[in-house]
Image (tube, rainbow, N blue to C red):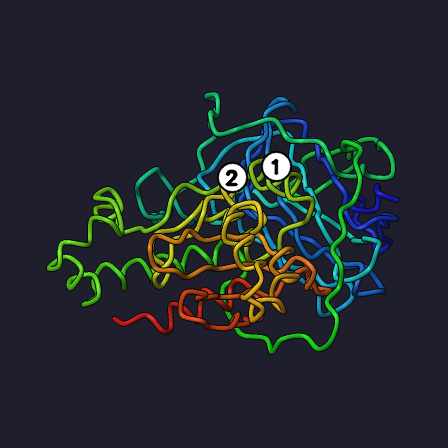
Amino acid sequence: MAVNLVEGTDSKWFAPHDRASLEFRLTQPVVVDQYVLTSANDAPDRGPRSWVLHGSRDGNLWRILDSRGGESFTDRHQSRTYRIFVEPGSYDRYRLNIFGSNGSPHLQLEAVRFLAGTSGFTGYRHRTGHAPAAYRGVRVVQEAPDTSMKPLPAGLPPVTESLGTRDVSRQHQAELIPGSAGGRRENKKSEGSSPKPVSGPLTVTEWREFLSDYSSTFLNSNYLRTAESDGNAEYMLSQTQREAGWLGYEPAGEEAVLAAEERLGVRLPPTYRNFLLTSNGWSSIGELDLLKVEENGWFPDLEPQLFQAWSSPGLEFFADDLELLKRCPLISIDGGSGGRWLLHADSAREDGEWTAYEWWPGEGGDLEENDNFAAMVASAVDAFPE
């Protein structure tokens, strides 16, 4: 029963699906800076793997507070604490949207707890045209309207039932409210062996740190200095990006990512999702720029003339790649380099990740396989000529 999430026992909440929306209502606004999820007594594959935490003051407008992907619980009854890395806000409603398990068609948790006022706060402030800036301070309740809050889209199965008031951490009262109804979206599993895993950033926090470091490296590189001396630097990044020390953009909202998934008809892989929730597009990863989430699309739709040309008689050497390319969203912009980055939807594995490809067709190269999007980014950054 869903009530077990807040009643402080070792029993569990179970859902007969792998997507769910859990809403917690407090008796007064609270500035939550950490939250805790506790795994249940069995079936590790039922533990949540990816989710988004939202806060609201009225139940209509919701602000994204935290996003996680690739998470797992190594032990039973294990409590894991997650820090919220956004500017503080005071909310009396918190919603946990769970988007997948660790392989099971079901979900389960033993408990959810919210922590408030735990030794101040730290995090990142992200403004348009500026790099993420670290900050630390003391919580202050904000009563002014929050312009970053937006209505949540429908599309997640509800919790199993509506519940009465129960005790949660910090002596605040909460109740679980049914979420909005909706269906599931599934990807096909890849055939054959999985690519060799390669490390790379996974969570939004890891992406912030990774991309901030790369921005600094790029902006202080001989590569950029050479481009400046050749008069080509202005085509690589804007003056605003130079001054900010950040090659990216504002994060994509969860609503924009969900809209893209609805448009494509697939659930995007976790490392790519968390990248978008960190920066909606990017300038100069290697020799490529990454598209914004609203700009990406299936390769045949974005490059129909090229796809048709490669399907023509006389170009049979591309034949083996055509079926794969049909099921690949294109996520990069050419920019004159001739390279392309693609994600293969039909290669989705149990962890939700897709095989990623780098391709330089103008050079007659084969599709270069990477374990996932994060691994492809890490590989490009490692190869960057400083």
Whether pointer 1 and pointer 2 mark residues with C-beta atoms closer than 8 Å, the reply is yes
- Give the quarter of the image for residue 285: bottom left
| Residue type, mark 1 in image | Ala
At 18% from the left and 60% from the top, the residue drawn is 227
- Give the quarter of the image for residue 168: top right
At label 2, counting other C-alpha atoms closer than 10 Å, the crowd grade (few under 14, some 14-19, many 20 or more) is some
- Of residues 32 and 345, the one drawn nearer to the viewer in this rendering: 345
Disc tally is: 2
Q: Is residue 324 visible?
A: yes
| Residue type, mark 2 in image | Glu
Residue labelled with disc 2: 294
Q: Is residue 133 left or right of residue 346?
A: left
Residue labelled with disc 1: 259
Establish if 354 lies above or below 24. Answer: below
Point out the residue furthest to the left here.
229
Percent position of residue 341, x then y: 48, 60
- Of residues 158 and 335, the one drawn nearer to the viewer in this rendering: 335
At label 1, counting other C-alpha atoms closer than 10 Å, the crowd grade (few under 14, some 14-19, many 20 or more) is some
Percent position of residue 237, x then y: 26, 49
Q: Quadrant of the C terminus?
A: bottom left
Local secondary structure at mark 2: loop
Percent position of residue 195, x then y: 62, 75
Q: Quadrant of the N terminus?
A: top right
Percent position of residue 163, x then y: 84, 33
Q: Is residue 121 visible?
A: no
- Give the quarter of the image for residue 127: top left
At 40% from the left and 59% from the top, the residue drawn is 209
Local secondary structure at mark 1: helix
Which of pointers 1 and 2 lies earlier in the amino acid sequence?
1
- Of residues 320 and 66, the one drawn nearer to the viewer in this rendering: 320
